[in-house]
Amino acid sequence: MDPVMDAAETLHQDEAVLLATALVDYVAASADLQVMFIKGPAATMMGLRENHVSADVDVLVRPEDLDRIVELLGARGWLERPSGVSVVRRYSHSRTLYHPQWNCDIDVHDRFPGIEATPGRAFDTLWLGRQYLVMAAKSVAVPSVPAAVIFQALHSLRAMDEIRHQREYSGLLERVDSSMHQDVLDLAVELKATAALQPLLDDLGVAALPFRHDSVSEEWRHRTSVQGTGTAYLAALMESPWRAKPRVLTRAIFPSRATLRERNLQLDNSVTGLLRAHLARWRRGVAGLPAAARKIRDSSRG
């Protein structure tokens, strides 16, 4: 039995996140891979968000290294969390790993929604401006402060109908010093993120520029309109050709076990357990349908 894994079971959430960060950095460095830790503890240590416990480790890797990082962590017992939502159209930007003996996930990103520069070029730009912070007694690479502002803003702007994201965005605006505005703008231009960051640039007073993108990408529109599984299925149903609608509807009503397991890794595979999981999912779906319909409608108007 691995003593480190045994100890991980008794860690508090914040300790687990910091220790998992150090673990990922160690695993990557052992294979000569470059990784950068975004959001979470790094943002807190930079003073860009209030101090609260993160649910997972967010790490950005070069796109060509994604499979390798997942493989290396897999050798240490980290498993890929099943993703039943893949049955509907979506844009994949990360792979989420969990470990039965750890109480936090590792979210491995090869790109970040809202940044339209090619993933490789975006990573090079971010890596050039990187800084280092100490987490769990290990110095790890994190974004520059302007880059961290961009990550935090994009994370909140994806779901501004949620109170938590509204609060975090307002808090971010209060913490961004005016001396940093130009640096944020210049980096947003280089990352081709000005379209998705329009609200932030407006709030910082640096919006009226000739080189700003006029419209956001299809991916960003999709991400800001589709936040949950129910909304994703509804969007897929509306966007699918007529011949595909019955298949999408069937998968929405009778999802695969992988879809059910995405919410509950300890899914009871008995007939009774599966029926209970389906009933719970149907209740959530019916309850969330009005809000999902409004979100899709508002997005189409925008």
Image (cartoon, rainbow, N blue to C red):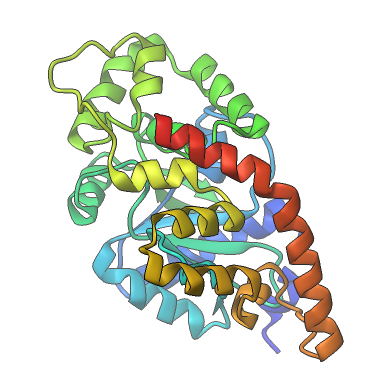
Q: How many marks?
A: 0
Location of residue 212 in the rendering, given as x and y in whole percent from the top left corner:
19, 23
- Relative depth, front residue between 92 and 120: 92
| Quarter in which the N terminus is drawn | bottom right
Above or below 133: residue 110? below
Q: Residue at x 69, y 38 (%)?
A: 52
Q: Is residue 131 visible?
A: no
The x and y percentages for residue 260 are 67, 74
In the rendered view, tell whether residue 103 sits above or below residue 157.
below
Q: From this view, report whether residue 94 is shown above or below residue 295.
A: below
Q: Residue furthest left?
A: 210
Give the image quarter of residue 4. bottom right
Q: Is residue 9 above or below residue 178?
A: below
Identify the residue at the far front of this view.
242
The image quarter in which residue 294 lies:
top right
Q: Position of residue 46 (x, y in %)?
A: 50, 31
In the visual, does 83 lie left or right of 162? left
Residue 25 located left or right of residue 189: right
Residue found at x 67% / y 42%? 290
* Residue 171 point in image, percent of width and height: 58, 21
The answer to whether residue 250 shows anywhere in this view is: yes
Looking at the figure, which quarter contains the C terminus?
top left
Task: Please state if 258 lies on the left or on the right of 146 as rendered.
Answer: right
Q: Is residue 181 left or right of residue 271?
A: left
Residue visible at 50% across and 41% down? Answer: 296
**Toward the viewer: 11 or 155?**
155
